[in-house]
Amino acid sequence: MDQRSESIIQQVRNELRAAVKKYGPFNNVHEAYAVLLEEFDELWEAVKIKQGTPCRREEVRREAIQVAAMAIRLIYDCLRENVSCSIEYFQNPKRQEWLRKNLPYIMGRSFEYQVMNYLRKRGWSVVRKFGSWGEEDLIATFPRGEQNGVRVVQVWYIQCKYSKQGETKPEDMPLEERKKLVEKARKHGGYAMFAGVGKPDTRPRLYFRFLEDFLE
């Protein structure tokens, strides 16, 4: 292996160590997939920087290294060695029926982890409500400094909606659910947020909206 390849591999190792030290291991493959998808979207954003821009080359390189490191984390944290599944396992009617029934939940959960990773990388602390009980899927907090000796924290109560085929909008939530989440957020001094996705050909697909703007 040449020196340049060794240098790239070492950079991936460094990124991997830093991520594990900061975030710890992935909890499951859905979380890992969501993080990897977020990194891939950031790589795509770097690729779209106009050619000739001084920072483009370094940005693409940095994001590609992060994609490689997160792929290794997925394999290391979530996939046991020496375990294989036969083709009969995937063709089993009960397995296929289970997938048909649970695929929307699986994809929705993966999107929630993607939103969590997006916010955490930007300094937010995020908690996921397991089972999606209640109006919100995630609760996110961000420190805003101090005022008169009192710590100020911004709080988001987030409802997540994902679709592989098309975009999702705040109006996809029933009006009563929107009102309940806004009322709950106001009661606790926070904001009710909607996390959705744009059309499949847009990058990044993830976006946020204040639900207070969608109460009519």
Image (cartoon, rainbow, N blue to C red):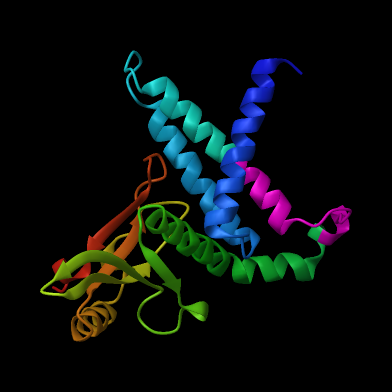
Q: State yes or no: residue 99 in magenta.
A: no
Q: Is residue 72 magenta?
A: yes
Q: Nearer the viewer, residue 197 or 87?
A: 197
Chief secondary structure of the magenta portion: helix
Could you tell me which residue is drawn at 35 percent across and 81 percent down?
135
Q: Is residue 34 above or below residue 137?
A: above
Which quadrant of the figure has residue 51? top left
> In the rendered structure, which segment of residues is drawn in magenta?
69-89
The image quarter containing residue 29 is bottom right
Rendering coords of residue 20 (x, y %) = 59, 53
Quarter of the image where the C terminus is located: bottom left
Residue 108 percent coordinates (x, y): 49, 65
Q: Is residue 51 left or right of residue 101?
A: left
Residue placed most toward the observer, 163 or 134: 134
Q: Is residue 13 left or right of residue 2?
A: left
Q: Quadrant of the N terminus?
A: top right
Total numbered badges shown on the rendered structure:
0
Percent position (x, y) of residue 53?
31, 17
Is residue 159 positioned above or below 23 on the image?
below
Q: Residue furthest front?
A: 149
Q: Name the residue rendered at 62%, 71% in the picture.
A: 101
Q: Nearer the viewer, residue 96 or 17?
A: 17
The residue that appears at 67% across and 66% down in the rendered structure is: 99
**Residue at (38, 40) in percent of width and height:** 203
Left-right relation of 25 to 140: right
Based on the displayed image, in which of its 4 quarters is residue 48 positioned? top left
Q: Nearer the viewer, residue 152 or 134?
A: 152
